[in-house]
Image (cartoon, helix red, strand yellow):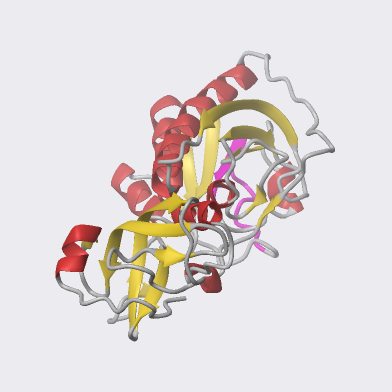
Amino acid sequence: MRVLFMGSPEFSIPILDALYKNFHLIEVYTQPPKQSGRGKKMSLTPVHDRAISLGIPVKTPSSLKNYRGIEGSDIDMIVVAAYGLILPELFLNYPRAGCINVHASLLPRWRGAAPIQRAIMNGDKETGISIMKMDDGLDTGKIASQEKIIITNDSDFKTIHDELSSLGADMIVDAINSVKEGRFNLKDQPEEGVTYANKIAKSEERISFNSTAINVRNHIRGLSPYPCGFIEYRGERIKIIKAQANMSRHGRVGHIIDQDLSIGCKLGVIQPTQVQRMGRKSMDIESFLRGTNLKIGTRVD
């Protein structure tokens, strides 16, 4: 199988590695380099870096709308995993075996850009990987396979991200082998249960305590350890990486209620257990409190 891979972030790397190991990976498409950091240096995507190290040709079109660079390529299949651009009809119809997507949710739940974060932030108890044959809709294609994983109260974005990334790598190998062996069966997505995972907005990083403590904790987990939810204490932005919810306590919404940095929610209280001050490494709450003179009653949201 001659495969072209399209992906960009860390999530896509195990899938890229699996394709390289098991099939004839002829080319990689990824997002263009972007300026980052204080020096505004050009930064490659994680997939771009890995493809270079593997010696695979890389293309970085900023748009595929009028892009014709795929024409003339001898490919059986395109595999997509968190690429970041919509595929036009030319790409969808070009490979002999079609385009296959590795999507980090149990479709039709959480179609869209941020399925892992939204599942955790919503308090879902499970999520998974869907291997889908792509069509011209937003994650609406027919399903080839799905596998579930459990989301626990200790799961955060990174733990679920890494587990799904590894699972997706295993599943895509089986999916491509099933195409080769003629056992690739597709089924329509259910019409019920559709939800959309909108991209995480910058405004969502500021933690709002105008909800239950469990909802606030889930919001923190869904953004941890990056981009991370934050509060502001006396003009300083403090990221909350981990927190516990206590539904038996209460306090003024969005205000510090004790010397342990407990913060009142609409219902219950949030107790941060791991935080990060600006320009510093993350630390447990005990280390933070030793260097901070908290003022009870201060608003932080």
Can residue 297 be seen here? The reply is yes
Nearer-the-camera pick, 152 or 193 = 152
Q: Quadrant of residue 278?
A: bottom left
Determine the residue positioned at 53% across, 26% down.
171
> The N terminus is located in which quarter?
top right
Q: Position of residue 85 (x, y in %)?
A: 61, 58
Determine the residue positioned at 23% across, 74% down.
279
Q: Position of residue 182 (x, y in %)?
A: 68, 14
Nearer-the-camera pick, 217 or 205 = 217
Q: Position of residue 105 (x, y in %)?
A: 60, 40
Most common secondary structure along the magenta stretch: loop
Q: In the orientation shown, which residue stands out farthest toward the right?
A: 191
Q: In the orientation shown, which residue stands out farthest toward the bottom?
A: 235
Q: Is residue 143 left or right of residue 116?
A: right
Nearer-the-camera pick, 17 or 293 = 293
Can residue 284 be seen here? The reply is no
Q: Quadrant of residue 163?
A: top left
Segment tinted magenta in the rendering? 67-83
Is the residue 296 above or below the residue 235 in the image? Answer: above
Q: Position of residue 22 (x, y in %)?
A: 43, 25
Q: Is residue 254 left or right of residue 73?
A: left
Determine the residue positioned at 35% across, 67% down.
239
Number of numbered callouts drawn: 0
Query: Is-magenta flag for residue 237?
Result: no
Q: Is residue 61 left or right of residue 227?
A: right
Query: Is-magenta flag for residue 69?
Result: yes
